[in-house]
Image (spheres, rainbow, N blue to C red):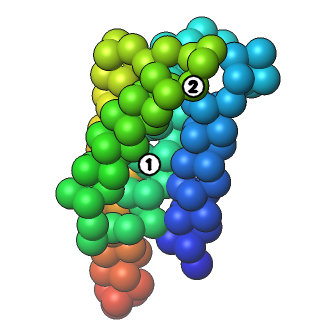
Amino acid sequence: MIQRVALIVGWAALVLITFATLSPIRGRPTLGGLQVEHFAAFAVMGFAFAFGLPRRALSVLAMMILSALVLEGAQLLTPDRHGRLIDALVKVIGGVCGVSAGRLALSWRHLIGLCASTSAKRPQ
């Protein structure tokens, strides 16, 4: 169940990131500094996809890198936006950090599950 929710969050994040990246500059939502927003958005998306697709870490990493590069490149096709290499790099780093955090959370979840099952089997 939690993996399904994580996938929904991941896809919703991708849709919102795409909208924010390709919308006119005046219509773009802002929450903080640009680099912080780029990093955080891709970190959330990477975490959600890594947690939702636990057996596809390399595919999720590739998706983070490819989506960052494609979205920055797509900005070059819009009249009032500009794709920059530094923005793409920050997005890739955010995605990689998010995927890493998701993998770590999965490991902790597995470890906690093992500890709980081991302690439940111990005779009192």
Residue at 53% x, 65% y: name it: 7
Direction left: furthest residue: 58
Q: Is residue 123 left or right of residue 74?
A: left
Callout in the foreground (2, 1): 2
Q: Nearer the viewer, residue 62 or 109?
A: 62
* Quadrant of the snapshot with the C terminus: bottom left
Mark 2 vs mark 1: which is more N-terminal? 1
Q: Residue at x 51, y 71 (%)?
A: 3
Q: Check contact, mark 2 vs mark 1: CB within 8 A.
A: no
Residue 13 placed where, x, y %? 59, 47
In the picture, residue 112 is in which quadrant? bottom left
- Please tell me whether residue 89 is drawn above or below residue 113 in the rendered image: above
Task: Name the residue carrying label 2.
Answer: 78
Q: Residue 2 or 16: which is nearer the viewer?
A: 16
Rate crowding at label 1 as few (under 14), some (14 to 19) or many (20 or more) other CA atoms within 10 Å: many
Which residue was labeled with disc 1? Answer: 47
Which quarter of the picture shows residue 122? bottom left
Nearer to me, 100 or 120 = 100
Q: How far across and how far down the image is residue 36, in percent? A: 52, 17
